[in-house]
Structure formats: structure tokens, C-alpha cells
Image: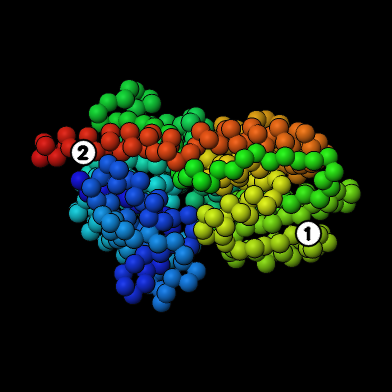
Amino acid sequence: MRLLLVVDNHLGRTKDGQVWSKGIYDYSFFSRYLDVFEEVNVAIRIEDIKDNIGYPNLCSGQNLKFLPIPDFHGVNGYIKNYFSVKKAINSYSKDCDCAIIRIPSAIGFQFASIIKNKIPYALEVVVDPWDFAAPGMLRSKVRPLVRLHWTNQLKKLCKHANGVSYVTQFALQKRYPNKAQIHKESLQHFQSYYSSANIKKDFFAPPKVFLPSQKAFQIIHVANTINSYVKGHKELIKAVSLLNKKGHDLSVKFVGDGELVSEFQEYAKLLRVEEKISFVGRIPDKDSMKRALAESDLFVFPTHGEGLPRVLIEAMAVGLPCISTRINGIPELLSDDLLINVGDIEELIRKIEYLISNSSLMTEVSKKMSYKAKEYSEDKLQIRRKQFYIKLKKYTESVLKEK
């Protein structure tokens, strides 16, 4: 059976036809769908590149085919390419038996609106658009429209799709209920939950031990794309500035790149904390990411919009004490004493100080992080993913028999 997989990202294609990724995607990510489907066709934005410098992760592999969508950036780019994307959707959906759409995204919504009455399809809901496009988060005049439109679209699609899986166990399901949840699961309508994380056994590390003599602390924050205010960069810079003025010795390593890096660097200079703030660019491979996390003391992620952040689970997997926001699925990972309200810098300062002032507490939290992260190991998650894919395949087989 041939699956159409719709993913919102940017990949590069070299002259030999091989497809490469800058970030989290690689063949192991896409091949998880091959556990059930014989062939997977991935519809994704692709640009032609001379070589894979800057694109270290190979995505191409056996039984995997990439269907290029015109590569564009931003709202204006999407509008200019709208009809080209529509043409691609009509073409690609004819060659597949069913679809899984990772959503929300402009491309994902467009695919779903066109194929929803043509072939069986399921959704993987990975983030909440209501939070992602909240005021101040996106630098676009149409942000309010995006927020309302995407939220309403997601609500409608979850009630229409044959299957819906969420990255959270409870949070996203409350705002975006699906048909199986409202009525009853059946062959035609089904649901599940699982994270997008693909954390292998060798990524996990023993819990950390913190000593009373430690005075300096390295904080790490990870957001591969730094093109919006969603991930709380400014709040963390402000908090570190104020904590250092109080006599603490904190520094922050920001992982990721994008058009707002220079703005955040200028903000650090304005607060006279630029020597304590570093932007290290993207870390594309898992070994380097594990090393960067393991070399740090604390993961702080004051994000405004998430489903269930993969980067937070990865930080927990190496035993980092973590602080993040009370939003969507994050309270499913962290206890309340490690959570802050969105945008609350004073609470962020209190929680950071609460940890770094008590070495035994930091050690105990590290143990809790390591233990909780094991629930999200790749082997455990893949069991639930596979069950969900099998349900889509079984329903598709029943539809094909009727034709």
C-alpha cells in the first residue's frame, strides 16, 4: 500500500537525486511509516542544492520517494505558489492509497481540504496554532487571521479525518476533539497519541550530580529556527540579565539560527549581558546535540506555543533539570514546580534561582527527568505509532475492496 505523507519543512536535493535535511529529519524518521506501508511518498518543500554542505542528514532511502512542493518562505511566498501547490496536491493524491498529514501548516491544510473526500487520511497534530500564532509571536500583519483560520481549520479537520493522533496525551485533544473521541472508535474513525521524538537508546545519559561548590551554571535553549518570538528567547535573556545582577553566574547557549538572531544579540547588548549570551547556530546531528546538552547544567525553554516539544524530551533524556511553560503538553512532562506562566519573567527568575541555589535539589530533579524521558524512547513510541498506522491501513483496505 502506498502512503502519501505530507510534511511542512524544507529539504535539499543534490544532482544525484538524493534528498538531505538541515535538522531533525533523516531516513530513520520517514522509515517509521514503512513499518506498515510498503511505500511512502513524502510531499515536502524541496530546493535543488549543489552539495549537501549544511544539509548533513540523508533522508533518501529504500521504499521512500520524495514529491517536491515548490520551495517558498513566509505568507507572501505561499500566496505566490498557491496554485503550484494545488497542482502538486492533485497530482500526488492520485498516486497514493491513503495519506497522513502532519499539521498545522498552510500546506497541510491545503492538502487536507483537497484530498479529504478522495482518499482515507489521518492527521498527526504536532502543535497548537492558537498558541503558536498568539499576539507578539509572529512578525506578520496577517498573524490574527492565521491564528483564527488555522485554529478553526484544525477543529474542523479533526472532526472529519478518519484518524487523528496528537503529540500530547490530553491537552490538544481538549481543544481539537476528533470524531472517535466524540462518538466511538470504529474501523472508519480512530485516534491515538505519540510524540514526534525519535530518541534512540544511545541518546540517553545517566542523571547528573551537582555539588554545593558549583557557582557558575550553563543554561541551554534549543530552537533550530529562530524566526519568531515563540520560543521565549527575549524572556530568557532578560531573566539571565537580572539574575546576574543579583550576583549569580549564569550564561546561556542558544542553539539554532534564523533572521531574529541579530535582534536577540542586540537585546543582550542593550541589557549589558552579551558576554553571557551565545548563539551557536544549528546542531544538525544527534551526537553533537547530545554533547551540547550534556555539557550544560540547565535547560530553560519559556516557549509560547508547543504541542509536546521534542527538544525538551531530549534535554530530559540526558539528565538536564528543565524549566518550561504551562502550555499544552508540557505539564505532562514537568511537575508544577518546574513550570512558569507564559511570558512571566519574574516567575522564570524565581524558578531558575530555586534550582541553582540547591545542589541536592538539582541532582534529584535530574533523576526525575531521566526517569520520565524513558517513557518517550523510540521503541516505546513506535509501538503506538505502528498501531495507529495499521488502523489507517485496515480502513483503506476496506475502502479499496468496495471500489
Residue 331 pos. (x, y %): 60, 33
341 and 382: which is toward the camera? 382
The CA distance from mark 2 to mark 1 is: 55 Å
**What kind of residue is marked 1?**
Lys
In the image, 348 versus 195, the foreground residue is 195
At label 1, counting other C-alpha atoms closer than 10 Å, the crowd grade (few under 14, some 14-19, many 20 or more) is some
Q: Residue at x 41, y 56 (%)?
A: 26
Q: Dot 2: within a 10 Å radius of its alpha carbon, few (fewer than 14), some, or many (20 or more) residues?
A: many
Q: Residue at x 79, y 63 (%)?
A: 275
Q: Quadrant of residue 52?
A: bottom left
The answer to whether any part of residue 69 appears in the image is no
Task: Name the side, left or right, on which 260 lies relative to 209.
Answer: left
Element under label 2?
Answer: helix
Q: Is residue 49 visible?
A: yes
Q: Is residue 30 above or below residue 361?
A: below
* Rendered view: 333 above or below 259: above
Q: Amino acid at mark 2?
A: Thr
Horizontal placement of 181 versus 340: left or right? left
In this rendering, the label closer to the viewer, 2 or 1: 1
- Measured from the top left, where is residue 235 in percent x and y? 72, 50
- Disc 1 target residue: 276
Occupied quadrant, residue 80:
bottom left
Q: Is residue 85 left or right of residue 242?
A: left
Residue 209 vertical position relative to residue 136 in the rendered view, above or below: above
Who's the residue at 62% across and 36% down the image? Answer: 369
Give whichever of 100, 129 is nearer the camera. 100
Residue at the location (28% across, 51% down)?
40
Q: Secondary structure at mark 1?
A: helix
Identify residue for label 2: 396
Q: Where in the figure is residue 251, as x and y percent of width and height?
A: 76, 55
Question: Which numbered marker is on residue 240?
Answer: none
Q: Estimate the x, y position of residue 43 in percent, counting from the top left.
A: 33, 57
